[in-house]
Image (cartoon, coloured by chain):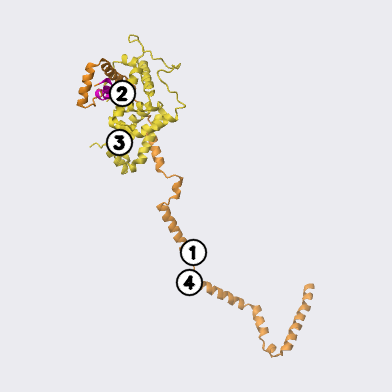
Amino acid sequence: MKCEDVSKELIAYLDRRANSAERVLVEKHLAECDGCRTRAEDFRKLWNVLDEEPIHEPSLGFDARLRQRIAAEARPGWFGWLVPQPRMALSMALLLALSVWISRLPRENPAALGASTASEDEQFQMIKDLGVLENYDVLTKSDVLSALPARQAAEAEPALDDQQQDRQPEGDGG
Amino acid sequence: MTRTDVQLMLDVKAGDDASFDLLLQKYRTPLVSFLYRMVRDAATAEDLAQEVFLRVYRARKQYSPSAKFTTWLFRIATNLALNSVRDNRHRQMQVSLDAPVEEDEAPIQLPARDLRIDEHMIERDRANIIRRAVAALPEKQRVAVLLHKYEEMDYSEIAKILDCSESALKSLLFRAYETLRVQLAPLVAQPVEHRAGEGRPS
């Protein structure tokens, strides 16, 4: 085995990871080569020297900070609002159904519809029974007036109107 | 019965957040440490580590155990770290041991062993020098060294993370350690004696 070949297996030999065949070859070379033997001894010392560098411990708040970051990631971002949530979807559906039901409620209630019709009839009846309209019926449907010829009746009506007009200024002036 | 990382991740996929906490407890320190060695800034390293865990959590629904969990985890971390380093390259000073020494930085002069000097300061200086030497490595070499030396990963895992063959990885590691051996020669020649568990990367 040459020095170049040993260089590749020297580290594995020193950290005891070389297989038995490799170990034998390296040991044989080290017994014959002063340079490689010195290098091997220096490597062992070097590893001791490298142990002098202390381990760097994480800060006390390391775990807490990490858990905080993980918790923050678990919460949905702004786009989460766009994703339909089951609870939200159910609430919206119930609200919509309730609105539809309420809006349809009056039309589907016959009692309310009948009450409304009855109210209109009563109002009509009240208007019809007013005194002015009653007098108007008496005038238009009187037997005396209907017995007159149509022309006289036509003349009588303007005369009656004139009398009423003549009276109005007096009333206004008094 | 202890669950494997893959099993834990599959449980996370099924909605078990407690399993995610277990993975977090297990890997937060190695991950922050790895990222700190990559970016050399504590706040950035923490931010990147948070991002790694967030990405793992976000991808939980699509997770399929095609590789080891650590391979996946450190692949995400490596990509984020390299992107961060590249994004900030124009603002960062690429400090190497060959660069002119700044006023507030001590030159690589090791104190004589017989002098009474504060050992803590020496250790800090040595750690700084090591950090700067590792940071001066080319990106791929740096990742390879950090994953091999500090995370003790298998060659196959590191090769997957770096998207190269195991043979190429071994060459990469050799070149990286050879560079560090030269750069850190003063420290290698004068090691501290009170270290325990030394002598092997894994």
- Residue count near mark 2 (Cα–Cα under 10 Å), binned few <14, some 14–19, many ≥20: many
Residue, disc 4: A111
Query: Between tags 4 and 1, which lies in front?
Result: 1
Amino acid marked by disc 4: Ala
Provide the letter of the chain coloured orange: A
Q: Quadrant of the C terminus of chain B?
A: top left
Q: Residue at x 44, y 30 (%)?
A: B87
Provide the letter of the chain coloured yellow: B
Are dots 2 and 3 in contact, CB under 8 Å?
no
Amino acid marked by disc 3: Phe
Discs 4 and 1 share one subunit: yes
- Residue count near mark 3 (Cα–Cα under 10 Å), binned few <14, some 14–19, many ≥20: some
Q: Is residue B153 visible?
A: no
Query: Between tags 2 and 3, which lies in front?
Result: 2
Q: Quadrant of the N terminus of chain B?
A: top left
Depth order, front residue of A160/A34: A34
Residue, disc 3: B69
- A60 drawn magenta: no
What label sits on residue B178 in the rendered view? none
Q: Chain of mark 2?
A: B
Q: Is residue A143 left or right of residue B182?
A: right
- Residue count near mark 4 (Cα–Cα under 10 Å), binned few <14, some 14–19, many ≥20: few
The span picked out in magenta is A2-13
Are dots 2 and 4 in contact, CB under 8 Å?
no
What label sits on residue B174 in the rendered view? 2
Q: Considering only order in the chain, which callout, 3 or 2, is on the residue closer to the N terminus?
A: 3
Amino acid marked by disc 2: Phe
- A9 drawn magenta: yes
- SS class of the residue under badge 2? helix
Discs 2 and 1 share one subunit: no
